Amino acid sequence: MEQAVTEGKILSRQVEPETAREAFLWREGRQVTSLATIKIYGNQYEVAENLMGKNVEVRYNPYNLNHMLIYSEGEFCCEAKPYLMKNFTEKRVQERQEVSNQALNAAMEAIVAEHTAHAKAKAGVSFARVMGVKQSE
């Protein structure tokens, strides 16, 4: 490896997109009920019947709670099927989105105000105002 570094060779490898996506999934432990369901964030999901009573790891994208991957002892078992959906994104994600939207709206308002002021300053004589069609603003 040291030889490769001294020779200036690039020591990187490609990662499959699916592997990269899985690395960023959130994980939570749950116990499967006797009805082969799990409950997470107020939603219920159906899972494989052979998991009844077992503790499983749920992996999911917090921005989309429709897809839940179920792992038992580190091995993929199944994808949980939504049964009763109340929430479609994780609560903490919703809060962050609201704060982000407020900041974005404030920035957009500032940009519009600046653009309007610049356009007024740049504008010359308004022929509509001179002809009495439009009142001055």
Image: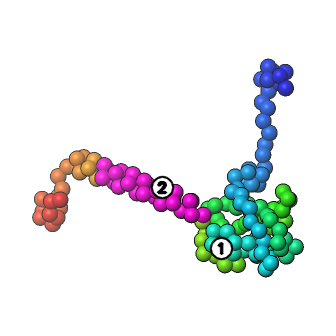
Query: Where in the figure is residue 20, as x and y percent of width and height?
Result: 74, 50
Residue 11 visible? yes
Residue 99 among magenta residues = yes
Query: Residue 136: x, y in percent?
Result: 15, 59
Q: Tell me if residue 22 comes above or below residue 77 in the rendering.
A: above
Observer-side mark, 1 or 2, equals: 1
Label located before the other in sequence (1 or 2) = 1
**Residue at x-position 56% and y-position 59%:** 92
Residue assigned mark 1? 43
Instruction: State how far apart marks 1 and 2 are (Cα).
Output: 25 Å
Q: Is residue 116 left or right of residue 95?
A: left
Q: Nearer the viewer, residue 132 or 37?
A: 37
Residue placed most toward the observer, 13 or 68 = 68
Q: Quadrant of residue 75?
A: bottom right
Eyeballing the image, is 125 above or below 43? above
User: Residue 26, position in %: x, y?
Assistant: 69, 57
In the picture, the disc for residue 116 is none
By secondary structure, the bulk of the magenta-drawn segment is best described as: helix
Check disc 2 and give the amino acid type. Ser
Q: Secondary structure at mark 2?
A: helix
Q: Type of residue at label 1?
A: Asn
| Magenta-drawn segment | 90-115
Q: Quadrant of the image for the N terminus?
A: top right
23 sits left or right of 110 in the view: right
Q: Which residue is mark 2?
A: 100
